[in-house]
Image (cartoon, coloured by chain):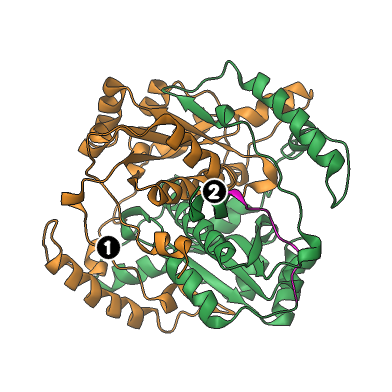
Chain colours: A orange, B green
Amino acid sequence: MNEVLKTMSNHRSIRHYLKKEIPNDVLEQIIGAAQWASTSSNVQAYSIIKVKDQARKEKLAELCGNQQHVINCPVFLVFCGDFYRLSLAAKMENTETNFDTVEPLLVATIDAALVAQNVLLAAESCGIGGVFIGGIRNNSKEVSELLQLPDYVYPVFGMCLGYPDMKNIPEQKPRLPLQAILHEEIYQTENQEKYIEEYNEVMKNYYETRSTGKRSETWTENVSKIYQAPRRLHLRGFIESKRFGFK
Amino acid sequence: MNEVLKTMSNHRSIRHYLKKEIPNDVLEQIIGAAQWASTSSNVQAYSIIKVKDQARKEKLAELCGNQQHVINCPVFLVFCGDFYRLSLAAKMENTETNFDTVEPLLVATIDAALVAQNVLLAAESCGIGGVFIGGIRNNSKEVSELLQLPDYVYPVFGMCLGYPDMKNIPEQKPRLPLQAILHEEIYQTENQEKYIEEYNEVMKNYYETRSTGKRSETWTENVSKIYQAPRRLHLRGFIESKRFGFK
């Protein structure tokens, strides 16, 4: 296994950090490498806000649902879908832009995710750990005001980064069997239940034996709760307020 | 620079391949490593369809806007946002699911993008090249029928993979200046035009000197055309047909 595969295969979400700064040149090397991620038609429809200010991290932690690691991490990144830059480009060329359909929302969300996955992996290759924070979408409007996001820019997720506290490294959370997520030629519905049941056993064992808080739960018990009710009902209105449409 | 940063920093989109299969065990090692990508609340809301059948690749190439590399690549992957598996999980637990808001669409799109970026980088670390195919969203309904995607599953993008034809390796397409995409504490609008103008010069020079088709164009000339008219107007209706809502 080469170093890239090894680094990927060693991923776990890190929520406990040493009190140690990430040097600026290290962070810039990480994000500079990550920028080579693919991007739709070279639009590079994303921006990253780097937050180190303690008061701002505290406010963000609260807006993300009181996540302590957002306060404790030395660097908190907010990944945004960003068509502001493209709207400027269009102005500079005296043309109009149209973000009225779902397409640009998908493009910017994908561009932000591609670069973010690179950022986390690059960080991990430098001995830094981190965790994605979907909770940044809990209070999109307030986050947007705090970070002064202009039109056409919305927060997709956050990311805590820091040097891992080695006394608090979690076990790896097992993934679905490869066959469940990889289909041959067409989507294979037949065996999904079987794979899910296999995975239920694996996850039950994981939760029962892990060091960072034991409980007894299968995968289906866990994830079936998440989408019982409509989630983040404010999102559509917020995204529209950033001048994206849903035609 | 470590191997991960080096592999990332060497990325370019590869559209010309040797006539050489990717061994199954290599592909499974790549996707197996990529699966360790982060995922929202462990939902793993994605699936990957591996297409090798020539006739199916030809049909997909046509649906993606006649992209020859979709036919020529030995392996074409279609990355899908997938809540079918979670809807099964809910059925197994006798609970209801609700995908009526924009949130699950973002979650599944992000999950698919995170794993896909890992897949491409893992492939690159094994000497394989590739390119993302956003054109898979040109004809979502037809792609969905061809791949027999069930409810709650939609194509996000495709990816061509193959061993690069070394006679046809493109130069790297330069990225925006780091300062343009990385903001300190709050979104910095002030200098965006300056960075864009710097990048215009870089891109003009890139297009004028590259080996794979010279032309003279700046970044703003190039990207300002892309969103002049509403793009992929069918997407919302298609995604609704897959039982996602936009509340």
Residue at x 50%, y 55% (from the top left corner): B3
Residue at the spot 76% in from the left edge and 68% down from the top edge: B165
Q: Is residue A184 above or below residue B145?
A: below
Letter of the chain that mark 1 sits on in the rendering: A
Element under disc 2: helix
Return the residue nearer the eye: B143 or B123. B123
Check disc 2 and give the amino acid type: Ile
Q: Residue under label 1, please give it.
A: A172
Residue A227 at x, y = what percent?
Answer: 32, 56
- Label 2, label 1: how many angstroms apart (C-alpha)? 25 Å
In the image, A145 versus A48, the foreground residue is A48
- Residue A61 location in percent, x, y? 26, 32
Specify few, some or many for label 2: CA neighbours under 10 Å numbering under 14, 14-19, or 20 or more. many
Q: Which residue is mark 2?
A: A110
Magenta residues, as a range? B9-18
When asked about the image quadrant of residue A101, the answer is: top right
Q: Position of residue B222 (x, y in %)?
A: 78, 37
Q: Please report, as a chain letter, where disc 2 is located.
A: A
Residue type, label 1: Gln
> Which image quadrant for residue A44?
top right
Percent across and percent down for residue A81 are 52, 37
